Image (cartoon, grey):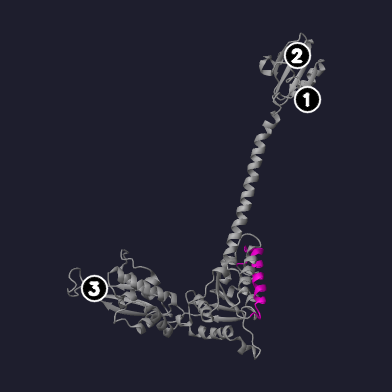
Amino acid sequence: MAGASGPFSTRGTPSPAELTQMPYSQLLRLAANGDVRSVALDEVTAHAVVTLTDGNMRLVLTGHESSQLADTLSADGVDVTYAVSPAGSGGGSALMPLLIIGGLLIAITLALTIGGRRKRRERSALVANAAKEAERSAVKFSDVAGCDEAVEELRDTLDFLLRPARFERVGATMPSGILLYGPPGTGKTLLAKALAGEAGVPFFATSGSDFVELYVGTGPKRVRELFAKARQSEAGAVVFIDEIDAIGRRRGGPGSAGGGQESENTLNALLVEMDGFVGRKGVICVAATNRLDMLDPALLRPGRFGMQVQVETPDEAGRRAILELYAASKPLTDEVDLDSLAAYTAGSSGAQLADMLNQAAIVAAREDRDVISDSDLREGHLRVLAGPERAAQVVRPEERRLVPGMRPGTCCRLSCSRRRTRRSGSRSAPAVAPPDWRCTARPTAPCTRAATSTSG
């Protein structure tokens, strides 16, 4: 077999481009007649250099059937050799596209792997670096209204944080975890901030969804890093986990399917860290949830979140205190009666009351007034419960009379009041339009929604 210096590269031998081309069939006829001395086959370029008995050379295009041609020529007594093209790079040229594609695939895989690791490190840093960004909470218990019973429950924990020696003398230990549960908007996060603010310790706030990650091992690692940072605080700390049901769901129960082993590993890491908090002075974990029934029993046992504080919607006295707290920064007219407004907003949470005052301020500003009236507050309350009034919606008269009394039933009571509307024109014009009746269904028990209808 010819090497790299085969007949195509011998000195004095013409290159394939200089040879006269001969048909494939003519090569077979000449070989059968004995007029062919030798044939040099090149499988890369798919041609053959034919040397005739008279010394002349011809070029034949053989395609890629070189093995069959070699057998036929050998049977006719022709010397057959395999040659390499002069460039010696025909094979490399054929492999070059494969090498390029393989290199691109490797580069893309490495980029995705490195990018995924960088993204996981950045998201883990949000929790791991919480201690560097934590600030002392400025919220106090005086800033919390409408949940006096929950505040009293937390004052004992505050005494543990401020004066632990008094409890240690009688063998008492501080609870490692406090679970605040109740409806949304009742002030659970505000209570946790107030506890940290009264104790004067760093406040580490995170959410249960921050620990949920697709990659295996990321959630447990974030849990360990967060609690490690809290333990490093010499002055103590309050770790607050909002919506803990995102990682503390009951194992093997409804909703656990699909969470996979990663969710259980995250919960197990949280349980282990809570055990490590026992006996740790000045460090306590506070969690909040709206779904106490969904939490795993191992999370609620004594030593972990054994202390559970219910934060319910405020009663009338609580709503009065909340309205007074949020109304202190807003200009109200003298006609506003907070006591009457507290009775009017039965079933509202603290967040809804704050939003009511804000909506009333928006209504007053829209009409270019500098003070908030009682009608603005009641309009704000309706906006919070049912949204803006749709004046363009046409309601039939019989529907106006039936809708207020359909659903309230046993949990609501109807209060109807007559109001007169003025015709367009001067503000001093007499009220000549027929009176309208506004009926509002207000909850008296667990019912928390209200229906309002205006009928002629």
Residue type at tag 3: Thr
Give the magenta-colored segment's residue range.
255-280
Residue type at tag 1: Gly
Circle number at residue 421: 3
Does 128 appear in magenta? no
- The answer for how far apart the CA atoms under marks 2 and 1 are is 18 Å
Q: Where is residue 412 in the image (x, y as percent from the top left)?
A: 41, 79
Judged by depth in the image, the label closer to the viewer, 3 or 2, is 2
- According to the picture, the residue beneath numbered tag 1 turns out to be 3
- The answer for how far apart the CA atoms under marks 3 and 1 are is 108 Å
| Residue in front for this viewpoint, 12 or 239 | 12
| Residue in front for this viewpoint, 125 or 449 | 125
Tell me which residue sits at (33%, 66%) in the image: 390
Q: Do the residues labelled 2 and 1 touch (CB within 8 Å)?
A: no
Few, some or many residues within 10 Å of mark 3 (<14, 14–19, 20+): few
Secondary element at tag 2: strand
Secondary element at tag 3: loop
Secondary element at tag 1: loop
Judged by depth in the image, the label closer to the viewer, 2 or 1, is 1
Judge from the rendering whether residue 351 lies leftward or rightward of residue 104; answer left or right.
left
Few, some or many residues within 10 Å of mark 1 (<14, 14–19, 20+): few
- Dominant secondary structure of the residues highlighted in magenta in the image: helix
Q: Quadrant of residue 226?
A: bottom right
Q: Do the residues labelled 3 and 2 touch (CB within 8 Å)?
A: no
Does 258 appear in magenta? yes
Ranked by sequence position, the earlier of labels 3 and 2 is 2
Q: Where is residue 384 in the image (x, y as percent from the top left)?
A: 39, 72
- The answer for how far apart the CA atoms under marks 3 and 2 are is 115 Å
Quadrant including the C terminus: bottom left
Tell me which residue sits at (61%, 49%) in the image: 111
